Image (cartoon, helix red, strand yellow):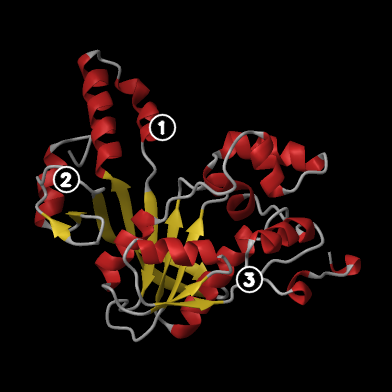
Amino acid sequence: MFAYIDPTIRARLIAQGKLIRIDSLGRPLDPDAASGGGAMLNVLGPIPLPLDIGQQQRTFQWYAFVRHTELAEANRIADALRGRGEQHLFHVLSNNMSVNSVLVLGDLREARQPLVRVHSCCLTGDVFGSKRCECGPQLEHAFERIDAEGVGAVVYMSGHEGRGIGLWAKAITYVLQDGGEDTYQANRSLGLPDDSRDFSDAAAILLYLRGNRPIRLMSNNPKKHTDLQAGGLQYIQAEKHVSGVSIDNQRYLNAKRGWGHVLDPDEIVVEKHKK
């Protein structure tokens, strides 16, 4: 179950080496392998993706990856819709899949110690350019740092909105934050975890593309480092990644610092006139 639009596409993509299945440790599996004890990912790529980085264009290689269980459920729904002649409802299929991405520049496997950013999706920051967080500038800066070195990867986790609580709940927490709560207190007020993100799929795709070899992780979050190590990446060097600090997100960044993010006080102090 690889392609719910036209099942014949599956064989063509496998033959081209563009579609594979891997286990939780990044090891390629038989395309028809039955689900075992761990999560399996379906990986599509590489697909050339020209991007504007600063004043120049660079072509990254894009891989999309999704859990086999989620894709199988989308196939089940697609078959049911076809059977009822309701193909116009295929848009509901996206509700059952968190399709993540990794964008690779250069030879990731052969690089000595490449930069890697594992970035949680943030519609308000990455797309709208909101300054309530630093997500958009962090993502942009990650691409710039990778471009400067000529090799590296950005893993973009689409199911991580609001540290895993989803966009609707995140919008509610913003209202609570405007009432005086910090970002973690707002989650707790909704009865939600401080951070419910799962980085195991990010670890698996990096193990597939890089193997268990050293990487430099652009992150200020020790939990991300620990979770990726638990997923099998043993050789991770933390790299500070501070960007996008403004008066609008200073309280948010202080809350992250209090929760354990490695941020020096002077790194998140901004004068009002620099807003």
Q: Is residue 258 visible?
A: yes
Q: Which label number is shown at residue 233?
A: none
The residue at the far right in this view is 273
Residue position marked by numbered label 2 in the rendering: 36
Q: Residue at x 17, y 38 (%)?
A: 1
With respect to residue 216, does 272 lie above or below?
Answer: above
Residue position marked by numbered label 3 in the rendering: 262
Location of the C terminus by quadrant is bottom right
Q: What x and y, as percent, mark residue 108? A: 32, 76
Q: What x and y, as percent, mark residue 36? A: 16, 45
Q: Label 3 vs label 2: CA separation?
A: 37 Å
Front one among 80 and 89: 80
Amino acid beneath label 2: Gly
Q: Label 3 vs label 1: CA separation?
A: 35 Å
Q: Label 2 vs label 1: CA separation?
A: 24 Å
Label 3 Cα crowd, 10 Å radius (few <14 / some 14-19 / many 20+): some
Label 2 Cα crowd, 10 Å radius (few <14 / some 14-19 / many 20+): few
